Image (cartoon, helix red, strand yellow):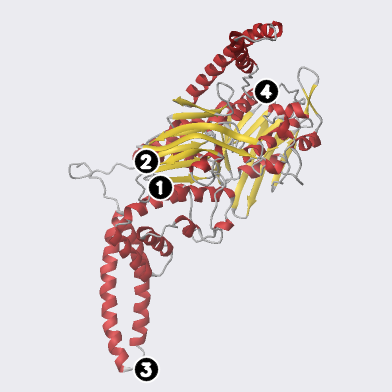
Amino acid sequence: MHYVSAEGLSKSYGIQPLFEKISFHIEEGDKIALVARNGTGKSTLLKILAGKETPDEGKIWISKDVDVVLLEQEPSFAEDKSILDNIFFHEHPLIRAIKEYEAVSEGGDPDKLNAAIIKMDDLGAWDFDAKVKQVLGKLNIHQLHQPVKSLSGGQRKRVALAKTLIDIGFEHKHVLLIMDEPTNHLDVEMVEWLEHYFDKENVTLLLVTHDRYFLDSTCTEIWEMAPGPGGESSYIYTHKGDYQYFLEQKAARLENEQASIDKARNTYRRELEWMRKQPRARTTKSKSRQDNFYSVEKKAKQLVVEEQLQLDMKMNRLGGKVAELKKLYKSYGDKVILKGFDYTFKKGERVGIAGKNGTGKSTFLNILQGLEMPDSGKVNIGDTVIFGNYSQQGLVVKEDMRVIEFVKDIAENFPLASGGSMSAAQFLQLFLFEPDKQYTYISKLSGGERRRLHLLSILFRNPNFLILDEPTNDLDLPTLGVLENFLTEFQGCLLIVSHDRYFMDRLVDHLFVFEGEGVIRDFPGNYSQYRAEEERNKKAEPVADQKTKPDVPSPVAEQPASPKRQLSFKEKREFELLEKEIPALTKEKEVVTAKLNDGSTPYEELQQLSVRIGEITRLLDEKELRWLELSELQ
């Protein structure tokens, strides 16, 4: 089925064109990754497809049977409403039933819970509710009554992702799912679950992501938005295959374009001499040659610039003593972050930090830099160490400044290993800030451009101990590739916190694994090796459990054990309801019994209480028996 056609799309902001005259088609089942450097309009193009922005020129056709669902980088919510109200926003009986059930399932009124379960049964909503439960659980979303305005940036992104996944699973036969950096703020377990989710779901997908493992696992096609072969402002190059194949094809294309330009330049030199010598009177033949000269001139003056970040930096000298951490303890109340941690950093060491959110990774980085103090222990930093801290907090500017002014406030020049120096303007160009962009106010930059400027400002200070906390978020893939190349040659110490598995695999030699409760394990390998070991350990656990069980002789011949039946979702809800109903009935029985034993109770009321105590006793017997049956399966 044909989903989308776009012809000649153009979009500009002021005099700055983002893209011009791009065309493409999307078919059902396509899984496409869109690649381009920051500032070329990737997010804007996604919003145009979702109907949130309009192009300046061009046409878009979307099949009337297709629903377009967009996950933005900065999601919008009804801020005063709860997570529950934001996720279940459809006015549909099925969604309303699930919303009512979720609202009373945690400590709600038993009568309301029972009514909600009956409604779920009537509508056959349990299968969809199971999917909802899976999405919320895997994305670690609980406390559904919490208002959205109180959430952190990472929590907001996860709620937006849950809302999107639940939305596409609700009565949508044909969906184009558009996602802008869906893996930001997700830990590795969540990203891997999302990969499996898309592998199982029959969804048509267009996404922008910097996570290359996620890209390779999820997408079968890569679109590169770049200047066209004839010098056009924008063009979409299509590559079938993985990210490595895309890089190879792109390199071959650029090489061919450069060869074509070199040939045009040779022709241009000959034709330029002819143009200068020929008489003023033009024949038809010479007029044709003249027109051809201008097309050759345009081709000859075209530049093929593979915009890269290449730095031959003269790093500040790093002495023999780098950093010594001795018996570090740190806690926040009952939450233990460090428990007697010891480590001595060596020159040129490259360490990755792994662990679930909330285990204290950022606190550890702050203690190392002296931004926070440990409860006890010592941190000794060498005299020659200059930290460069690329934090999740992002770029902090006291007042709105132009890009060039911000960099010059740090230093006028950057020292080079070959001697000499590089000016602030030249340094900015290495980071893809063209001269006209350098005089833009920072407030006008895109999210990715601000992240790039933040990274530039850290490196411009010429550190010899780099601390990178989630450096890949919001950086485009071209910048990431060359950043990795630079960090590979970096001679100083490197400490990286990242959920980007590809980035970690390329750059780190070993890991500090934060396992919680103050335990930090030093793992000798990269991230993929660590995850592979975890998987092996999980598979080995059942075998280990079997080996530890004592052998008990049996008087009868062993029979193959039949697989134990699991509770259905309906039975789970029934079990949860019984755990609330039985205590309520027990309490009511105590109250009724006390009134029956009270000599002052009127006769008419005694009759009613006698009937009720019989009903309660019968109900308790039935429900306790059913509870025992279900608890055996639980």
Q: Which residue is mark 4?
A: 310
Query: Label 1 sits on what residue type?
Result: Ile
Disc nearer the start of the sequence (2/1): 1
Dot 3 amino acid type:
Ser
Label pair 4/2, CB-CB below 8 angstroms:
no
Q: Secondary structure at mark 1?
A: helix
Mark 1 vs mark 3: in front: 1
Disc ID at residue 201: 2
Q: Secondary structure at mark 3?
A: loop
- 229 or 617: which is nearer to us? 229
Residue 412 occupies quadrant: top right
Q: CA distance from mark 1 to mark 3?
A: 62 Å
Dot 3 or dot 2: first in sequence order is 2
Query: Spatial distance from mark 2 to mark 1, Cα to Cα?
Result: 10 Å
Q: Which of pointers 4 and 1 lies earlier in the amino acid sequence?
A: 1
Is the Cβ of the residue at disc 4 closer than 8 Å to that at disc 1?
no
Q: Residues within 10 Å of mark 1 (few under 14, many from 20)?
A: some
For the point 54% across and 32% down, which residue is it?
Answer: 21
Is 513 placed left or right of 136 in the picture? right
Say which of 289 and 465 sits in front. 289
For the N terminus, the image quarter is top left
- The CA span between labels 4 and 3 is 93 Å
Task: Give the residue displayed 38% in from the left and 76% down from the top.
Answer: 587
Q: Are marks 3 and 2 in contact (CB under 8 Å)?
A: no
